[in-house]
Amino acid sequence: MRDPVRLNPIPALVERARTYFRSEVTRPLQFRLERLRALEASMRAHEQQVFGALKADLGKSPHEAYPAEIGLVYADLKHARKHLKQWMKPARQSLPLTFWPGSAWQYSEPLGTALVISPWNYPFQLGTSPLIGAIAAGCSIVHKPSELAPHTSAVVETVLKHAFGDDGYVTVVQGGAETNQQLLAERFDVIFFTGSTRVGQIVMEAAAKHLTPVILELGGKSPCLIDADADLAVTARRIMWAKTYNAGQTCVGPDYALVHREVKDRFIEACRVELASLYGSEPKQSPDYARIITPRHHQRLVALMSGGRAVIGGQHDEASKYLAPTVLVDVDPASPLMREEIFGPILPVLEVKDMDEAIEFVRARPKPLALYAFTSSSQTAERILARTSSGGAMVNDLLLHVASGLPFGGVGQSGMGAYHGKASFDAFSHRKSVLKKPFFMDLKVRYPPYKVSLDLFRKLLG
């Protein structure tokens, strides 16, 4: 008998995952806890392989790789195990007096079989962290790692197979864009995608054919708004750190800076000082500075730099995929530099007369995944937060909100849905509303033939 997985692998693999979910073995609390523990044990057993793969794919140092790629996942696993029992409990809801006697509840039930498509920029963390929510919720999973980070994608597959075996519970499918298309042609119960807005549109279009819910973690141009009263040394240090972390290949990384004209020049000089403190006079020689993922992405970034004039950095070497930390001025707001998400270590700096002008600049563009306000005034910070919309925001710092346990997600073109902590569990769950009624007190007033006046219904129901 011929093996259907070998003959037509994608549909057969998806059906096997659906069959596994229908067996209902994923529903008990103990099963989910055991699988979360198995994932952590497998990660710890393969840590050194993860470090090596991230170095090979992105040039990441262990000091970047551990907190951003591994430590965050351990923290998510610990949090999920600690709280999962409570998350799974039916939640009692209030009930209007007119529905008494009775009780109202919300039950969390797994959506079913999930498709998780992960990106290349944080290929281990974003390849495993969403799975924690799916496992906690009781789903079966088909996982597609990124082909652009081949070493890490191979390790992700090793970790997951070591943790879960190969019986349909968690299925890893390797491949490129064609494999993504084949997977998206199948029917899933939920799709979790992390990547670009352009590909997110393709994912959502495919999901719409099956009315499949989606969680889209996309990107966008996340701005920094820097007022005249900001501590420029700290502001520059934090922005340069965030802009060069993973060589700027971070979805919530700062994309551009809107700086009060009174402090623009001083801010740029502070950036120069802080970059030298971070990476020395030759960032290319620093063991802590990562590389661009592929020559194609490197070429795209070099082309974007034509939209401004480099006053810091600008050096690049395609052979080693190196692009220096770069600050640009004289920026053309209509150039591709200011229309596309940069996703690299290039910071355009634009001058504004005040924070109101900065706010209007942000409001005239698609809603970003993150927004960063730098000011010593709490009133100014609140005005910026109140008048702008973004997936998340920070005041006087960057990136850290992603690791804080707060729900993380986008809005508008930067995405939909959220995860991390309980939000991860909720992302892969359906909240089923249940009203329970006893047999006694079956009042005849609700049944025809109606023998009461309409005024009674008005009084009871408003």
Image: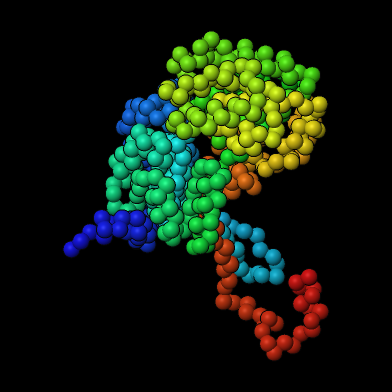
Q: What residue is drawn where x is 41% and y is 41%?
A: 146
Please state which of residues 382 and 74 is positioned toward the viewer in this rendering: 382
Q: Is residue 98 or residue 22 the one in the foreground?
A: 22
Q: Residue placed at 33% from the left, 37% from the top? A: 154
The answer to whether residue 139 is left or right of residue 214 is left
Going 56% across and 25% down the picture, which residue do you hit?
345
Left or right for 204, reference 331: left
Please tell me whether residue 254 is drawn above or below residue 232 in the rendered image: below
Q: Is residue 81 visible?
A: no
Query: Percent position (x, y) of residue 43?
Result: 36, 35
Relative side of 443 to 72, left or right: right
Foreground of the two, 262 or 416 = 262
Residue drawn at x 28%, y 49% is: 166
Q: In which quarter of the image is residue 39?
A: top left
Tell me the quadrant of the picture where the N terminus can be found: bottom left
Quadrant of the rendered image containing residue 431 = bottom right
Percent across and percent down for residue 316 are: 51, 21
Q: Colour scheme used in the picture?
A: rainbow
Residue 205 visible in this rendered orientation of the protein? yes
Which image quadrant for residue 35?
top left
**Closer to the camera, 14 or 392?**
14
Q: Does residue 437 lie above or below 348 as drawn?
A: below
97 up-or-down from 194: above or below:
below
Q: Position of residue 325 (x, y in %)?
A: 56, 20
